[in-house]
Image: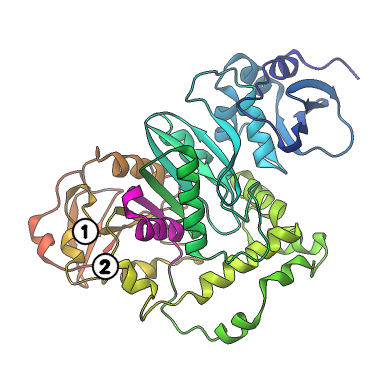
Amino acid sequence: MTAPPRALRRLAGRYDHVAFEPQGGLARVRLAVLGSDTWDVVIDGGTACVASAEGDADATLAADAQTWTAIAEDVRGGMDAYRAGRLTVRRNLHVGVGFLAATSGLTGPGRLRFRMVATRRARLSIMEAGSGRPVVALHGLGGTKGSFIPTVAALGGRFRVIAIDLPGFGDSDKPIGASYDARFFARAVSDLLDTLELDRVHLIGNSLGGRVALEVGLQYPDRVDRLALLCPSLAWRRERPWAPLVTLTRPELGLVPLAPRGVVEAIVRRLIPSSDEGWSAAGVDEFLRAYLTPAGRAAFYATARQIYLEEPNGEGGFWPRLRGLEADALFVWGRRDRLVPVAFARHGLVMSSSTADTCLRSSLRAKPTMWLASSSPRPSNARTAPALDGSGKRPGCRRQPAAEAFIDLGAAPSGPLPGGLLRERKRLTCPIDRAGDG
């Protein structure tokens, strides 16, 4: 085999353990030059060296020779190539992207870095970048902090963005027997803020993370500035016919593997479109990485169980409690999202008789506003930053039949909302369903 390419040796020579250090201090990162040879970078004890590829690697990064050269010559080249799809990262996103961060050559305080934070109750793995007002990002069920890589890149120029692995997921601790309900996760977020010495933050939450962000806002209102909620998983208002059975089923059953790894992988990849390509492939890898461990399965089952069983109404129910939310909030819904359907948007504006009035006022004052986004992260990220810092103008509104007011982010001109709509209690949707629409 020929000598390692200069570009790969240059990357290994730039390794900075402050930006990323694998758990246990040891990791093997496979670097594949498409159409040519494959090499490993062995990280051990704070140093990295290029070696022949052998055995199993923790993460595999693949790109053509030209891309590897560009990555070595440009300090931002690695993450730019990854986000553009010219570089793929498989198996362990934490290790793969952590390697890119640690070999970027950047040394400033706002550079991308990964670290484990020991809080009062658990160790939480975080990814952070940028400087400015702090934003904490919370992933969805089965996800990890890696799902917020595009968001960290989009907002890092204006905020200090901290994406975390919630307890039970990714590289964070996975306590057996924990409740894994919204209150449990909210306490974990509060503990993290204490450890990082952050008094007040913006919160971004996707799916489960959106529900957790709302719970933080309800339990610790003094610690939350604004919320950006991407398809938050809210308490079911429909009948739950499986509730008695789910109540009796213990999540600790996840400690026992009920199906071989190959069967689990085949089922997951069959359920998720394009599971071997791009972001979907990386997301599947991250899910399987935790789910295929006993503690990860138990945490997943416990969390899914709590989502299904959460009481929607009555004393202590989610929807009555939601009326007490004080933080400004931006809700983003996906028209084609079947898991967390846009139908949830109908309920958010019925939280109180005055919700529709207040939610339409500028600066997202005091009550949630309903939005809809496509499956691409670009529209959501483009709308999130102005919502958090208050710099963006509200989109224009137009009257629609069937007593609905639509905010059209794709076509309507920017400008204030017509004053008449402030007196009409209509629900809001937002017809963005064109993939890639910014």
Q: Nearer the viewer, residue 328 or 190?
A: 190
Which residue corresponds to the image point at 41% horizontal and 41% vertical from the top-left? 135
Q: Nearer the viewer, residue 402 or 370?
A: 370
Q: Which mark is residue 359?
A: 1
- What amino acid does circle 2 point to? Leu
Residue 286 rendering spot, x and y as whole percentages: 66, 49
Residue 287 rendering spot, x and y as whole percentages: 66, 54
Instruction: Give the colouring mode of the picture.
Output: rainbow
Assess whether mark 1 and mark 2 are in contact (beta carbons under 8 angstroms): yes
Earlier sequence position, callout 2 versus callout 1: 2
Q: Nearer the viewer, residue 176 or 418?
A: 176
Q: Where does the N terminus fall, quadrant-wise? A: top right
Which residue corresponds to the image point at 52% horizontal and 74% vertical from the top-left? 308
Compared across the picture, whether 155 is left or right of 147 comes to: left
Magenta extent: 210-234
Above or below, 407 relative to 193: below
Return the residue at label 2.
349
Q: Which mark is residue 199?
A: none
Above or below, 18 relative to 406: above
Disc 2 packing (10 Å; few <14; some 14–19; many ≥20) = many
Q: Nearer the viewer, residue 294 or 85?
A: 294
Which residue corresponds to the image point at 83% horizontal and 25% vertical from the top-left? 37
Above or below, 42 relative to 251: above
- What amino acid does circle 1 point to? Cys
Compared across the picture, whether 276 is left or right of 387 comes to: right
| Residue found at the very far front of the displayed protein | 120
> Please, what secondary structure does the residue beneath circle 2 have?
loop
Q: Tell me how far mark 2 sits from mark 1, CA to CA.
A: 8 Å
227 in the magenta segment: yes
**From where the camera sits, is residue 180 visible?**
yes
